[in-house]
Image (cartoon, grey):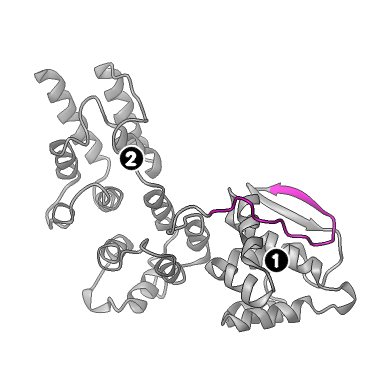
Amino acid sequence: MGDIEDTFTDFRQAFSNAYLGNGYLKLRFLLQDHLPISVLSSKYNTGMNLFNSLKDRGDISYTDVNIMSEIAKVTKNATAKSCVKAFIEDVGLRYDASEGITLSSYRKTLYNAMDEITEVECGDVHNLTAYYGLGHLGFQNKWDVVFHLEKEVKLNDTRVKWKRFANQLNTKAQIILLEYNPSGADDTEGAPSISTGAQATTSTDGGICRQSSTQNSDLTSQELMEIAKKLGFDWEELAIAGLGFKKPDIDRLKMDNRNSIIGAIFGMLDAWSKKVSVAEHTRRSQLVNALKKIERNDLAEEVEINNIL
């Protein structure tokens, strides 16, 4: 038993060494759901201390390193992956990924968004500190900012909080955050389909379901896709308050595009576009007015001057 425990100690140390410097901040972020704030907030903490705490709590052992394997995969850390593989082979562990603590979908989604959050001057970190009034705290990096926000604001409590947070970030980060719904899975069973009265073809591009209208339009499908990417969390408000959709319509779009929220947004815009009379040639102006109605003047201006691409 002693040899196995020594091997497990060496493994934890080697795994922790794969996350030095800012790497430790990533570990702290990913383990935030499993360790108390008192442990995570320790000024002189190390990755080894975090994993020792998990061991003391019974969350990891030499027969259960599931969370460490997940962390290695999510962070795409080749050294950490090699450590896990070598340890499993060394102790002859029959690895069962279904056992032990795991990373939640919320945690993995937010981590993937963190990869896109910018720290440049006037970038995402600047927007977050300004919006939440954190300038006086002197945060130097995105990991500390979000760690603080998770403690004090509880970002995933409600969709409103999640949306406010996402709206301070760049488009790439927003698209990732759109895939997570803080209020839980949507109840889409029995929702009626949207009748557009027009035929459409479906193609796949990068995992996103695209519907291509057979009608002519002064807004192209390519433009609608770019609008979908930039619209973000405001899409449901635009659909209902600006474009005449009902909640069951939104539910159906989500169900039909359950693997891509951007596909659902594009589907909504495409369905709306088909319902506007071709002879009127007013799609662009109608969409501009709808965007202004929900106070997305930034996007309305791009659409109006035909500068969306």
Residue 192 position within the rendered picture, expressed as x and y whole percent measured from the top left: 69, 56
| Amino acid type for the residue under numbered disc 1 | Leu
**275 relative position to 305: left or right:** right
Q: Secondary structure at mark 2?
A: loop
**210 relative position to 118: left or right:** right
Q: Check residue 40 for magenta coloring.
A: no
Residue 158: numbered disc:
none
Residue 124 position within the rendered picture, expressed as x and y whole percent measured from the top left: 41, 69
**120 relative position to 228: left or right:** left
Residue 304 position within the rendered picture, expressed as x and y whole percent measured from the top left: 70, 81
Q: Residue at x 37, y 46 (%)?
A: 104
- 119 and 26: which is toward the camera: 26
Which quadrant of the structure image shows residue 278?
Answer: bottom right
* Mark 2 nearby-residue class (10 Å; few <14, some 14–19, many ≥20): many
Tell me which label, 2 or 1, sits earlier in the chain: 2
Which residue is labeled 1 in the image?
269
The total of numbered circles placed on residues is: 2
Classify the position of the C terminus by image quarter.
bottom right
- 242 and 126: which is toward the camera: 242
**Which residue of the protein is positioned furthest toward the right in this rendering?**
279
Q: Spatial distance from mark 2 to mark 1, Cα to Cα?
A: 37 Å
Residue 102: numbered disc:
2
- 265 and 73: which is toward the camera: 265
Q: Residue at x 77, y 68 (%)?
A: 273
Q: Residue at x 17, y 24 (%)?
A: 7
Q: Does the CB distance between marks 2 and 1 fall below 8 Å? A: no
Q: Is residue 282 above or below residue 264?
A: below
Classify the position of the N terminus by image quarter.
top left
The part of the chain drawn in magenta is 187-204
Residue 202 position within the rendered picture, expressed as x and y whole percent measured from the top left: 76, 49
